[in-house]
């Protein structure tokens, strides 16, 4: 119990303080968009709102899963994020709730529904825990703590492989995910944590009944590097720090599958978001850039979200897209070189 | 009125003093031309002159639209540019004349016909102003002030979007441009201001009856960055500072349309001009490099134009082109790699 | 005799002390692998072992041919390498045994079978020596000294060409290699020393009956540069320091031939190894990174091998490969760009 | 007369002292050659000799045209080059002999036959001088001064265009060249001086009866930059300093024409030479790298030539080419990427 608590605060510390944990690969910069000198719309009329799982969002933005635990600072982070999500009308995922099972005091950090009564909230658990004995009733209790709109199961084989205490049994996991999809009465989203979901993975997940995938690709936060910083011998984690599928490439590989896509991993601006939407994403997640603001205040988080929204709306305007449907999957907006 | 005056001098100051406003992307450098060791012509016989809208130019050069207003310095700039245009036999566009409507004292800065009786002079107005109530008679008065050979309507959605006081209603603008084309008894040129005219824009403009388009693409002066420097919060403008279609790429995309093309945006040498002409431009515009000389004297402006003409003539000679027709659209002069 | 002894210790000194002898071209970095978020295996079950020439290896790793001689330090290096090979279950090649023929005291440095009773051990001789009079019985004595599982004949025309005392008669060598293949009762492996085996070379070798080729391509240790450092006039060796076929490219060119491939030349990590195996290698060799550890102790060598094995196993896990067969030649694991 | 003398020594000074006159573009580095681990030849048997215009050369090397004049230093340069050419069995071209016509004292610098009785010697004149009144009998006297094996006519429109006193009438020159080809009883070689002969030029020259073309492409010495340094206003010459067709590209464009090709412009090593021969050159010229040695002594020039020959022979050996025929035009030696 101590261990898992200590790990969480260590993660937060490393990510917040060491800029090299964000790999800053800017993979989206390789995509160049066309420009409409004659957008034929009024910027004031641009409507960036979307509906996701039946709830309306002010724009397709997700505060990606980060943390949770009994620590005071961690509780503050989650509440600041939740209040910002509610105020700004965006979605939010919490960090892994596994800590709840061993440390009941951690539950409070996930009880965010009061702070965000209308927001789209996602529970989060590591899928590999099912192989370590996590039960469906534990999963349900995690979802209940948040009264979540959906459950995110994350896949993190690289993160587990490079940490000494890692849970490394990923065998037969897909079948277990299929069972959760069948038994849980909430939608299940599957995501990576920064190395990307490949075509082969996505095909398995679709067969397992998963309807929403967050590619969480390479280019932004590197969990391999974070675990390297925590370990006595950083060499393995550093070698694999840029392993994985770049986010835009993961989106391209999955775009013709019958699944709803979320983009995350290295998204840093509203222009990146527009590019991800053009590559068929329905929602765009950001994690690390929100961590330091969340340590500060609700307003600091809101300021970041507002900035990104303004950038996104500006990009929509300059692409002549009055609403998100005109953007989504519209490859003609990519400037071929 | 104060506002618009203040803005104009601010623009001039920022552009003249801060070199990073010119993005120096040198997109034309990616194009390599062939060389004729046997040009079979006499350099002394190379004739760079062209006719444009019925007037003869010493070479296909346009002093691109920059400024205008009641300020002393601004009047000087415009008069220096006009006298240089007359002396060197090149075309000149003035900056936006909207200021005239609120500040009658600004009119003098546009009354350049006396200084340039034979030069090709272009009026300039922002097309979006039509959506803000600008009338056809105001447009006519702008053209009359210069006794202009043509009217330039500029499209600047990015510039407007990143400035706090921006005019951002670009809806239905194309139809309004079509009306101006029909009602005004002068040719109408449509241009961007540094983000480029896309294929889709150009197709709309051609349908609206526009016969001349200045692509004014990305690579040179960045209005997004200029407005960023003026605003309290530069982040939006800086994010979009390199947004847009690079000038050579914009030319390529429009080259098979039935429209006369002007190239501008990052053109800095006579070699760039030759490349633009090979990509089907009929005229090449330059703005920023003429600003500082224009603050100084007519001769300083003339010296720049003479240098560019000499470079252009040298390039024609080395390409074996005795006249501009042999250059224009002649893709065989591009060295394939 | 003095000469050849002196040369060997000079080589060791230069390679160990001057980092620029390793060209660090990282040619494998251009290949990007896919990632399996759902590997569907247990990392603990990943089995990196292979069989090569009837012996089992803990993973497909070869300590590439480096040295041998009567010098104390050189004997220590070879014994440390041999003991590490035995302990870690990997293959080992010795350096050229030609020195044995002129300096009988050198033999002891090759008598490694006692130190490595179960390890796969390879003898090593320069093929060009056959043209200089080396006999089949000398070759047999070299193989006997080690009780080797196979004989490596190395081809090093660049190294010979840039050294003053080089053996430069490579004419008719292929036929002589064919004779050795016929007459020796051990398998014959042919390798380069850092410039690569080309398609044309490999076709000749296959016709000569060679069944195993180590491409030993460019990108890692540069013998041309090493000989440059030894010579009075370094210019020739430095000019050719990066001459040759990059290791991944050599693998690609030979992959459809009916021959067992060994990859070496610039392999530095377990990820490089995984890439080489995907490009059809059956074994991966590393030389220079093991030299300094071998000057120190058996444990220092073992630590390097263990690190590489852990990296290789991690890569297998993240590619969803439970055993090496699932990796070898599996081009679907390469992420196309 | 003074003028032309002064210009020659100025050129020599600028080229010798200012390293930036050599553009060091290393265009040949983009071509990667294959490597033969099994060359199947003896390096001692590699024969780099060729025949050119009926004379045997020790290898296909040409000391490219540089200078001539009445100045003491210039005479020394030419005599050192000629003696080195004789001793090393290579070809040599002199610099432009036009100076002879106005300054008879300059003739001695071209009377090199005594110093090089067996060497292949080339006269040199600017083709554009024919348009300035140079007669066929003047041309003959130039050839006679050297008792030259052939006449080189150089084409230098860029050099002439950027110098104030330039001869810029290149009209109808091809027909005049055809007349010289018809009337002179020696072979006529046409070359550029560092900007390259294009496909279109070469087709005209072939029609004019020219049988040998030296592409003299871009990448090495830049005459535009040299003239810039001499002029009061360097801007034009500097703008055009890298204008022209890179030498390897010029060779590729001309390779299927029925003409003998000489490669020059940025050739700096024997590896560059091997690449040029593979791209169908029959001879390779080098100018600037020989200038400083020629100011020093015959032996200094010979040392450079010997170094290049050794590099060339080494490359032939590693490509498995026993003689130059096996190299010339053999595209299979290029490693495709
Ligand atoms: C501090 C921190 C903690 C994280 N914890 C989790 C987690 O518990 N569960 C999860 O699915 N992803 C977690 N992630 C991964 C993110 O949700 C996201 O997939 C990844 O960081 C890529 O986004 P980014 O580049 O915008 O940071 C975490 C990321 C950060 C920065
Ligand atoms: C100081 C300055 C003021 C400008 N004002 C106008 C304007 O009023 N109207 C217009 O159409 N373009 C205006 N432009 C844009 C230019 O006409 C041109 O399209 C753009 O700057 C790209 O050219 P350049 O890279 O050569 O500067 C202005 C440019 C500058 C540098
Ligand atoms: C110090 C040293 C000595 C070597 N001696 C030999 C040798 O005697 N025989 C041989 O076939 N290769 C020899 N090699 C070449 C290696 O076996 C290998 O092909 C090459 O170094 C590329 O691997 P690397 O980049 O991992 O060093 C030697 C390499 C080194 C570094
Ligand atoms: C100092 C100097 C003088 C030259 N003079 C002549 C000349 O008179 N005639 C000529 O055809 N080329 C002349 N050239 C050009 C060379 O012959 C050659 O085409 C060019 O320099 C490219 O070769 P490089 O890169 O090896 O110097 C001269 C070059 C140099 C460096």
Image (spheres, coloured by chain):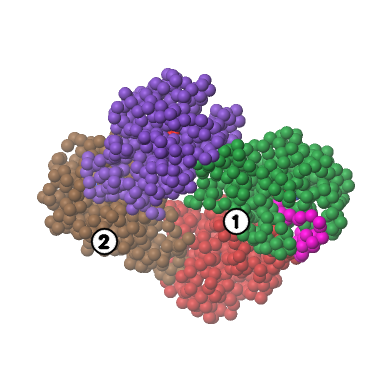
Chain colours: A purple, B brown, C green, D red
Q: In which quarter of the image is residue D304?
A: bottom right
Q: In the shown orientation, is residue B307 left or right of residue B298? A: right
Residue D155 position in % (x across, y down): 50, 67
- Residue at point 20% right, 35% down? B3
Query: Which residue is denoted by mark 1 in the rendering?
Result: C252
- Chain letter of mark 2 equals B
Disc 1 residue: CB within 8 Å of ligand 3: no
Distance, label 2 to label 1, CA atoms, is: 50 Å
Q: Can residue A272 be seen in this view?
A: no
Q: Is residue B233 above or below residue D31?
A: above
The residue lying at 41 percent from left, 22 percent from top is: A107
Q: Are marks 2 and 1 on the same chain?
A: no
Give percent across and percent down for residue A187.
Answer: 37, 37
Q: What element carries label 1?
A: helix
Element carrying mark 2? loop
Figure quadrant of the N terminus of chain B: top left
What residue did someone put label 2 on?
B259
Looking at the image, residue D282 sits to the left or right of residue B265; the answer is right
């Amino acid at each position: 119990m101590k261990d898992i608590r200590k790990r969480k605060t260590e993660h937060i510390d490393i990510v917040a303080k060491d800029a090299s944990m964000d790999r800053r690969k800017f993979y989206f910069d390789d995509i160049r968009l066309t420009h409409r000198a004659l957008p034929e719309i009024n910027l004031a009329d641009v409507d960036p709102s979307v509906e996701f799982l039946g709830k309306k969002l002010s724009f397709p933005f997700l505060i990606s899963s980060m943390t949770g635990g009994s620590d005071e600072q961690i509780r503050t982070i989650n509440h600041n994020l939740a209040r910002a999500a509610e105020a700004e009308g965006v979605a939010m995922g919490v960090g892994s709730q596994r800590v709840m099972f061993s440390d009941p005091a951690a539950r409070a950090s996930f009880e965010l529904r009061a702070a965000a009564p209308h927001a789209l909230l996602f529970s989060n658990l590591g899928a590999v825990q099912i192989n370590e004995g996590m039960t469906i009733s534990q999963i349900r209790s995690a979802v209940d703590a948040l009264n979540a709109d959906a459950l995110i199961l994350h896949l993190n084989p690289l993160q587990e492989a490079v940490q000494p205490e890692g849970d490394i049994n990923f065998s037969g996991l897909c079948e277990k995910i299929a069972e959760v999809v069948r038994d849980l009465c909430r939608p299940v989203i599957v995501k990576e944590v920064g190395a990307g979901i490949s075509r082969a993975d996505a095909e398995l997940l679709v067969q397992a009944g998963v309807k929403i995938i967050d590619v969480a690709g390479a280019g932004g936060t590197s969990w391999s590097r974070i675990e390297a910083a925590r370990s006595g011998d950083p060499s393995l984690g550093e070698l694999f720090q840029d392993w994985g599928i770049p986010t835009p490439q993961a989106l391209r590989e999955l775009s013709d599958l019958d699944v709803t896509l979320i983009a995350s991993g290295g998204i840093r601006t509203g222009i990146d978001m527009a590019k991800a939407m053009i590559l068929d994403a329905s929602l765009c997640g950001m994690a690390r850039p929100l961590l330091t603001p969340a340590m500060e205040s609700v307003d600091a988080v809101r300021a970041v979200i507002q900035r990104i929204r303004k950038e996104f709306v500006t990009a929509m305007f300059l692409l002549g897209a009055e609403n998100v449907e005109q953007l989504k999957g519209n490859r003609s907006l990519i400037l071929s070189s």
